[in-house]
């Protein structure tokens, strides 16, 4: 159930509002066109159970720069 995923994700994020913001941003980035949005949201919350989503933000910000270098070359 999704409530179990939410409570598991709250172990890394103490603020529910922050969890909603991070989950919505991650869902937008990870969503694939021909899949259900609910499945993508569940996958994001499952990932948040295992890792700290706040620490992953610094890794995600480094990735677009690498992509820009590839396009320019």
Image (cartoon, rainbow, N blue to C red):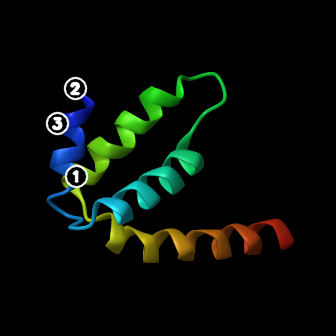
Please give the name of the residue rendered at 44% of the width and 77% of the height, measured from the top-left corner. 58
How far across and how far down the image is residue 47, in percent?
A: 30, 48
Count of numbered tags: 3
Q: Which mark, by number, is residue 9?
A: 1
Q: Are marks 3 and 2 in contact (CB under 8 Å)?
A: yes
Please give the name of the residue rendered at 55% of the width and 76% of the height, measured from the top-left corner. 62
Instruction: Tell me the crowding category of disc 2: few under 14, some 14 to 19, or many 20 or more residues within 10 angstroms, Cα based.
Output: few
Task: Specify whether 60 is left or right of 19.
Answer: right
Task: Specify whether 40 is left or right of 11.
Answer: right
Residue 40 drawn above or below residue 14: above
SS at circle 2 = loop
Please identify the residue farthest to the right as the structure is shown. 72
SS at circle 1 = helix
SS at circle 3 = helix
Please give the name of the residue rendered at 53% of the width and 56% of the height, measured from the top-left corner. 25
Say whether disc 1 or disc 3 marks the residue closer to the N-terminus: 3
Task: Specify whether 19 is left or right of 22.
Answer: left
Q: Which mark, by number, is residue 1?
A: 2
Q: For residue 21, what is the image quadrant?
A: bottom left
Distance between the Cα atoms at labels 1 and 2? 13 Å
Instruction: Tell me the crowding category of disc 1: few under 14, some 14 to 19, or many 20 or more residues within 10 angstroms, Cα based.
Output: many
How far across and how far down the image is residue 53, in percent?
A: 33, 64
Residue 60 drawn above or below residue 43: below
| Quarter of the picture holding the N terminus | top left
Q: Which mark, by number, is residue 4?
A: 3
Distance between the Cα atoms at labels 1 and 3? 9 Å
Distance between the Cα atoms at labels 3 and 2? 6 Å
| Quarter of the picture holding the C terminus | bottom right
Which one is nearer the viewer's eye here, 67 or 41?
A: 41
Report if residue 1 is visible in the image: yes
Say whether disc 1 or disc 2 marks the residue closer to the N-terminus: 2
């Amino acid at each position: 159930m999704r409530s179990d995923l939410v409570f598991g994700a709250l172990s890394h994020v103490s603020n529910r509002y922050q969890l909603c913001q991070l989950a919505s941003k991650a869902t937008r980035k990870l969503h694939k066109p021909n899949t259900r949005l609910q499945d993508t949201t569940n996958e994001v919350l499952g990932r948040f159970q295992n890792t700290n989503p706040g620490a992953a933000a610094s890794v995600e910000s480094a990735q677009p720069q690498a992509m820009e270098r590839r396009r320019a070359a």
